[in-house]
Amino acid sequence: MNLKKFSTQQDERTISVYLAFRYPEKYILYKADYYLKFCELLNINYGKTGERFLHFQELADQIISEGLLNHAKLLDTYRNLYSKPDWDDIYLMIQNILYVVFAYDYKDEKFDAILKKYDKHQLLEYYTFFDEIIEKFGFKRNDKRLVFNVSSKEIVITFGQRYIWTALIGDKEDYRFRAISEKPISNQYGKFNGSPEAYLCKINDLSEALQNKQAIFNSITKEIERTNISGYHKYNKKELELMAFDKEYRYTKLGEIPDELISGEEEDKVVLANYPLNQILYGAPGTGKTYKTKQIAVEIINGKKERSRKEINDEYEELLQAKKVLFTTFHQSLSYEDFIEGIKPMTVEGRVTYEVKDGIFKRFCLHAKQGETRQRGSDLKELSDLESSKEITGRYVFIIDEINRGNVSAIFGELITLLEEDKRKGNDEKIEVMLPYSKLGFSVPNNVYIIGTMNTADRSVEALDTALRRRFSFIEMQPDPDVIDDSEYKDVNLKRLLEVINLRIEALIDKDHQIGHSYFIGIRDLDNLKQTFKDNIIPLLEEYFYGDFRKIGLVLGGSFIRQEENKVHFPKNFTYDNDFPEDKKIYRYIPFNNWNEQTFISVYEENIDAE
């Protein structure tokens, strides 16, 4: 197999797993941090991103070819840790040796402990701005003018004798970063002693650094002109330096690849790594699935960054208007003809004719195939014209709400296979099918992301069509009481109320029939809370328990439901096969107008009388 021609959208570690499991006698498992440390130990340069697995494989093969695994003392030490099996896997031996050498690197553990003190997004922002500095000045690793260190309260990058860029640990101060500048760029700053004149400015947001980067760059330029080596170089921390210059190591440590921090050719790979092409958000009603689809759609198309709820909604509406996002809902009467294509009657001059009409998904895919070249408002090109174009640009999101309410197999038909990542148009193993009505070839482009939602109260994930489950990633959306912990309504502990209700529901049914946190978002007073229970919570409980007041009472307690005397008398002159006891218990809701704060508090606090 010629690995240099191996085209894939998987990362190198995943590829190594596939190959090592299939051909254990030929390939080694690749792990980025072990590889990087191994290169450090050997004092050799790393391979380029995308070629590191191959480089690691070459190093392993060199160890074998030079007979290093046959060294007597090495084997004795190895056997003290690993007993001899029936057959020694030589690549496994190398991996075990690297594990022993690197896994117990206590210095690395200490470094990880430092990183855990930081907000991950803050660290990404911190190194992102240093990427700008690297690009501007062409800094390289092992530059003795640069010092990377950490104090008890911040990570520090020093050039020469002065701090140039720092990140604060924790949130005890009212700033997150400090930057050198030729002039004050914030209200909080200190002035360096001596010349050239410079200031160390406290800033809270990365945008402040980006807006003033010329003043920062000018100050760094002056430091470059007067510095040959830093007097603090002996305090340089290699791990922090590696985080600054090696993005793969950085993202390995931080556990996330942020697509807004990478541009150019890497961007599509990064987005794909963070967002699968096909995914379904599932969970109980009210867990924020629909809102989450908006957030994901915005992040896929516009990049991942911190946004307020309003900003997400505004950007989402813009994407809808630009036809980059389409939202639809599955229902029982939706068909293949509505979704892909079908023959529809048309009346022309009083005569009924039949034409092949594209469905909503096919139209959206044709639109996405045109990518950024499509002029907004223009008609879609014919399918035959579009198939001749190989260039697919831009990202598009197709959202299917309540995907489990439709007959997925019937709606997608033969296109269910085309949803797979490697079968998409634009990939090496793309598949094209001939559609039954138009008799034209069709494939799903690789720039269309499909996001579905489903309520587990309606149908469990296990009950979904098997073909659908194989082709979608499933992300569970659980009730998150912490979201409402800072509600402006404080007379009732909404977080505790939701937690107790869900614990009781799970005990009586299962976790798929819980209550979501979104019903409680925006509650400002008692009237809001009462209306939410009357219009949303109680109807859901009636649906979950099929109107069984006894079980609803076990969830909400006696402050919501009371037992009344059965005063019904049945006629004596008519008989019924089954005895119907006249002493059957009758349950009724306590009237809505009688509800007060204590009614709700009694749900989660024992010995509280709501009367």
Image (spheres, rainbow, N blue to C red):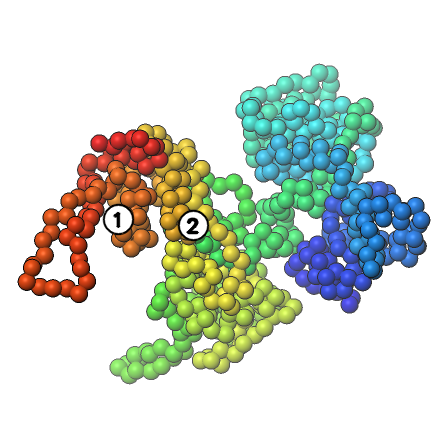
Is residue 393 among the parts visible in the rendering?
yes
Residue lying at 64% horizontally and 24% vertically, measured from the top left: 153
As displayed, is residue 34 above or below residue 91?
A: above
Given the current orientation, which residue lies at the most extreme left position?
Answer: 573
Q: Nearer the viewer, residue 460 or 427?
A: 460
Given the current orientation, which residue lies at the most extreme top position?
Answer: 193
| Residue at the disc numbered 1 | 549
Q: Nearer the viewer, residue 274 or 525?
A: 525
| Residue 147 at x, y percent in the picture | 76, 30
As displayed, is residue 456 above or below residue 114?
A: below
Marks 1, 2: nearer the viewer: 1
Where is residue 109, by image quadrant? top right
Q: Inspect the image, locate mark 1, and give the three-letter code of the amino acid beneath it.
A: Phe
| Residue 247 at x, y percent in the picture | 70, 44
Q: Would residue 192 appear left or right of 78 to someone viewing this image?
A: left
Q: Nearer the viewer, residue 590 or 443?
A: 590
Q: Inspect the image, locate mark 2, and give the three-letter code of the amino acid beneath it.
A: Lys
Question: Which comes sooner in the sequence, label 1 or label 2?
Answer: 2
Q: Would residue 595 appear left or right of 68 to someone viewing this image?
A: left
Question: Tag 2, which secondary structure?
Answer: helix
Residue lying at 20% horizontally and 36% vertically, measured from the top left: 594
Number of other residues with Cα within 10 Å of mark 2, as a class: few under 14, some 14 to 19, many 20 or more: some
Question: Tag 1, which secondary structure?
Answer: helix
Where is residue 77, by image quadrant? top right
| Residue at the disc numbered 2 | 511
| Residue 438 at x, y percent in the picture | 46, 79
Q: Spatial distance from mark 1 to mark 2, Cα to Cα? A: 20 Å
